[in-house]
Each structure stands twice: as structure tokens, then as C-alpha cells.
Amino acid sequence: MECRTARELLDAARPDSADREDPELQAAFAHVDECDTCAEVLEFRRGFDRRVGEIVRDVPVPADLRARLQQAFAPMVETPQPRPAAELTQRHVPDSD
Ligand SMILES: [Zn+2]
């Protein structure tokens, strides 16, 4: 398997999970186990993702974010959002106004 193919296949895979048993990913995992360059690249990407995740979790969500997103995406939405989805969102995004 080529390095590029292995890296593309494993970009979203989790090495310490059932992904290791996924038949479609096994050849890619086998490649990375033997290829130091790919192992290094994937480890760097995972570290980067972990760090971005940590930073994003620490950023407070602006109180008016939902309204701003709805306004921004309104022109792209052809049909109105179904009610249950809107209610679900409401439960998960606390309003501070
Ligand atoms: Zn490689």
C-alpha cells in the first residue's frame, strides 16, 4: 500500500479502538506499523487534533451564536428546520438572555 493511501484511510481512524479490526483499514494499519514516516505523520495529526480539541473546549460559546448561525445559514436552507430538531438544539444550547 502506498503511504498516501494509508494516511488517507487512517486519517479519521482511532488506533486504540475497534477500527483496528476493520477489514478495510487493516492493510493501512499494517502499513503504518512498518512505515516510520507514516507513523510519525499520523501521530502528529492526532496530537494536533487533540490540541485543537482542548483549545476549542475552553472557548466560551457566545450567547447569540445560535441566532447568528441561523441568520447566516437561512439563505442556504430551502425548507424550514423540522420542529423536533429545533427543540433538540434548544435543550443542548443554554440561552443566557
Ligand atoms: Zn508509509
Image (cartoon, rainbow, N blue to C red):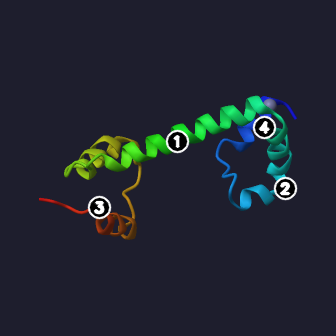
Residue bearing mark 3: 93
Identify the mark at residue 75; answer none if there is no mark.
none
Q: Which residue is mark 4?
A: 6
Q: Are marks 4 and 3 in contact (CB under 8 Å)?
A: no
Q: Residues within 10 Å of mark 4 (few under 14, many from 20)?
A: many
Q: Is residue 80 left or right of residue 21?
A: left
Label 3 CB sits under 8 Å from any ligand 1 atom: no
Label whose residue precedes the other's in the sequence (4 or 3): 4
Q: Residue 19 occupies which quadrant of the picture?
A: bottom right
Percent across and percent down for residue 56 are 37, 45
In this orientation, which residue lies closer to the viewer: 94 or 58? 58
The percent coordinates of residue 82 (x first, y second) are 39, 65
Query: In this rendering, which labeled residue sits more in front, label 4 or label 3?
Result: 4
* Image marks 4 and 1: residues in contact by CB distance under 8 Å: no
Q: Is residue 43 left or right of residue 36?
A: left
Q: Ligand 1 near label 4 (Cβ, under 8 Å)? A: yes
- Which badge, 4 or 1, is on the more N-terminal residue? 4
**Cα gap from disc 1 to disc 2, whole angstroms:** 25 Å
User: Is label 1 in a helix, a strand or a loop?
Assistant: helix
